[in-house]
Amino acid sequence: MNDFAERELTAVDVVVVGAGQAGLSGAYHLARAGIGHVVLDHAPRPGGAWQFRQPSLTYGKVHGMHALPGMELTGADPLRPSSEVIGEYFAAYEERFGLRVRRPVDVTAVRDGSDGRLLVESASGDRWSARALINATGTWDRPFWPRYPGQETFRGGLLHTADYPGPAPFAGARVVVVGGGTSAVQHLLELSEVAAATTWVTRRPPVFRDSGFGEAEGRAAVALVEERVRRGLPPQSVVSVTGLALTEAVRAGLVSGVLRRRPMFERVTPTGVAWADGRSVDADVILWATGFRAAIDHLAPLRLREPGGGIRLDGTRAVRDERVHLVGYGPSASTIGANRAGGAAVREIRRLLARDTAVAPALAAAP
């Protein structure tokens, strides 16, 4: 008998995979609805992806952190690392609402089980049988590394935002930052204070948002991402369609030249990067602030992907399997979107469970 067969199979109504903003929101609404569930999180402690962010990203620098449902985050010191502030907040939230999160648990696969249930498998061999699944695994575990000619010849360091330690190790270094999002801007602003030189490179010209970003603009931005998901395409992040906020720090970076953007280079050389027109820049480090992709490989056995490469959703529900809900994916990838998606997923799951409960006696009574 193999290890998996020897492990006990735990039956629950719902398995929540991930205990970041989206997962905790889903668990909160499940608890309020009285639906039996378990929350599985691969991280070593509360805090979601925030716990892995560099200490230099203080809470005051965080771009839009919305409170979890039912409990505000108040009195936080803006000078403390966001990893500490939000980690402590998530831990307090789990305790207040009795959200017993099992960690660390690495979910390796979700499959069709018996009697119309889902089988959730973990690296340790523990297994759960569920009537529905809320997948809230986010993107942090899948950093996107572009490939450019000559990259393997570079004699300096190659680094991704996911492993960025803060500015101190880059003192005196020449750093090329690649990417047009908020992380790239944050890296450049703090690296410029210690590095010998910084160069900003993006595929498209960055768009800075000087005007207010209200509810109407937010809905329009989410709608753009939602349309891709509806078509079964890999989602873009909501942030990618909102533009970069023109804060005072960003204004100063534009004036000083720190945020002077260059177009994408053609190739990587042993000593830096080079453009097709003959220009080049020497570098000690290339920092890829090139974003992340959805961490959903464990869902592969369910064959949810469309030909376009993404998972097509109706709200939060996977079109190819009504038992599976994705929160923190595509249009719900922002913190406020994750909160709303958690509640929406639970409303759909309540209907699913109620329907299945009503159908089971009827089937049993049929001749």
Image (cartoon, helix red, strand yellow):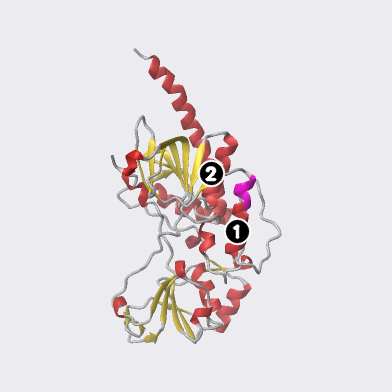
| Residue in the image at 53% along x and 41% along y | 344
Give the quarter of the figure containing the C terminus.
Answer: top left
Q: Is residue 246 left or right of residue 160?
A: right
Task: Check disc 2 and give the amino acid type.
Answer: Gly
Q: Nearer the viewer, residue 19 or 122?
A: 122
> Is residue 358 positioned above or below 78 on the image?
above
Q: Are marks 2 and 1 in contact (CB under 8 Å)?
A: no
Task: Check disc 1 and give the amino acid type.
Answer: Ile
> Which dot, 2 or 1, sits closer to the camera?
1
Residue 130 visible to an observer of this rendering? no
Q: Nearer the viewer, residue 146 or 254?
A: 146
Q: Residue furthest top?
A: 367
Bounds of the magenta segment: 92-96
| Residue in the image at 65% along x and 69% along y | 79
Badge number at residue 137: none
Q: Earlier in the sequence, mark 2 or mark 1?
A: 2
Question: Where in the figure is residue 273, as x and y percent of width and height?
Answer: 36, 82
**Dot 1, crowdedness within 10 Å: few (<14), some or many (≥20)?**
many
**Dot 2, crowdedness within 10 Å: few (<14), some or many (≥20)?**
many
Q: Secondary structure at mark 1?
A: helix
The verdict on residue 94 being magenta is yes
> Is residue 286 positioned above or below 243 on the image?
below
Q: Secondary structure at mark 2?
A: helix
**Which residue is label 1 attached to?**
86
Question: Where in the figure is residue 164, as x and y percent of width and height?
Answer: 48, 71
> Alpha-carbon distance for marks 2 and 1?
18 Å
Residue 164 visible to an observer of this rendering? yes
Give the quarter of the figure containing the N terminus.
Answer: top left
Give the main secondary structure of the magenta stretch: helix
